Image (cartoon, rainbow, N blue to C red):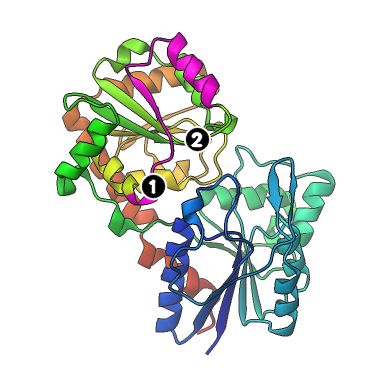
Amino acid sequence: MATFAIIHNIPSPYRLHLFTAIGQELNKKGHKLVVHFFAHGHSDRPDSWQNPDIPFPHKFWRDYGFLVRNIELHFNPGLIVHLLKNPPDYLLVGGPWDSPTGFLASLINRAKVKIAWMEGNTITPGRITGLIGFYKKCVLALYNYIAVPGLEGSNYIKLLYGNKYTKFQNIVILPNLVDESLFKPKTLCFSEKKEVLIKSLGCRSEEKLAVWPARLTQVKGIVEFLRNISVELLLNWKIIIIGEGSLENEISDVIKQRNLSEKVILKNYIEYQKMPDLYSSADLFILASLYDSNPLSVIEAMHSGLPLLLSNKAGNFPEALVEGVNGWGFDPCNVASVVKATTSAFTTTDDQLALMGQKSIERAKIYWDTGKSINAFLDAIIAR
């Protein structure tokens, strides 16, 4: 029996689903999983994420981390000592260069098979040259495999290494996954409970609903999108923006200035357990991010049967969207692109929206089916 260990920052709902699925598949193969968490939560994540029911072996390690430019850098010396004394057969390290713990775990990693787990994309790759680029390449050189969520992650590694990429071809795909059993299309699960939810958000039954889950921060592109959308397009629509953040006042001001108060509603955090009802009551999903490494909300929306109005800056854009088939892509930094996409989306008929939503479900099953994705990942790295 081999031990497969994962080190990760916090127990977010979607990661718990992913780890549970990995654990189940490992058990079938006669192996065992253990997950080491850096912390119970982060200051910019809901308190409800802390101390959840966790169905697999795990441990929270004491964190001596610190903040740098509002980024939490974890330092868990107890975990490092544990890994030195008890090296697992397989070790998957999330964010190998993003924290002192990740870096030290990379450096002292004595596992038989070492997997670096990371997200990145070529649209907003960050610093990949100079000392920072050298540091990243040195860290990845310590691993047998690099796990990325999709095509953009693979392309990022190729961009990082340039002409020397051929030395590091052990890239495996570990998609960001959600529990698809929770997310159903409107036609399968409309209920009075959801009707009450929609009314509580200020929507009328005759209006179509666009749902936009996003933290109210600069990178989500909310202000830019609202400044460029045509008010006339929203005659029969309501947009619900769900999130909290530092730009709440600025976004509220833009809504008032553009006379969008009847059409765009800001809603503070909604419990994760209620999000499937909201998705399945909607007609369209929006994400206008200026940068988004691999947003899970896109995958949730696709499993829920929603067409996408999606920024091409999202890391999972290549897998998620086929233009005009299951939605519309746009460059959030290009006004003409925003205008073209929003005009198409908000003038599409109900029947066509429903058909495009079905295409989203089909693509979600191809790229983000939990069982198939986990089996493919484990088969790629575990010796038979």
Q: Is residue 270 magenta?
A: yes
Residue 322 higher or lower than 264, as above or below: below
Is any part of residue 326 visible from this angle? yes
Identify which amino acid the numbered label 2 is placed on. Glu
Q: Residue at x 72, y 66 (%)?
A: 76
Q: In the image, which disc is placed on residue 244? A: 2
Q: Disc 1 residue type?
A: Glu
Q: Earlier in the sequence, mark 2 or mark 1?
A: 2
Above or below, 170 relative to 244: below
Residue drawn at 24 percent across, 24 percent down: 348
Give the answer, above or below, for where 241 lies relative to 378: above
Q: Which residues are magenta?
A: 248-273
The residue singled out by tag 1 in the image is 271
Seen at 55% across and 76% down, the residue is 34
Q: Between residue 107 and residue 82, name the one nearer to us.
A: 82
Helix, strand or loop for disc 2? loop
How far apart are the alpha carbons under marks 2 and 1?
A: 13 Å
Residue 110 seen anywhere in this rendered image of the structure: no
Q: Quadrant of residue 280?
A: top left
Indicate left or right for 131 with 216 as reference.
right
| Residue 102, horizontal then vertical, whole percent | 71, 62
Q: Is residue 105 above or below residue 245?
A: below
Q: Label 1: few (<14), some or many (≥20) within 10 Å?
A: few
In the foreground, 156 or 338: 338
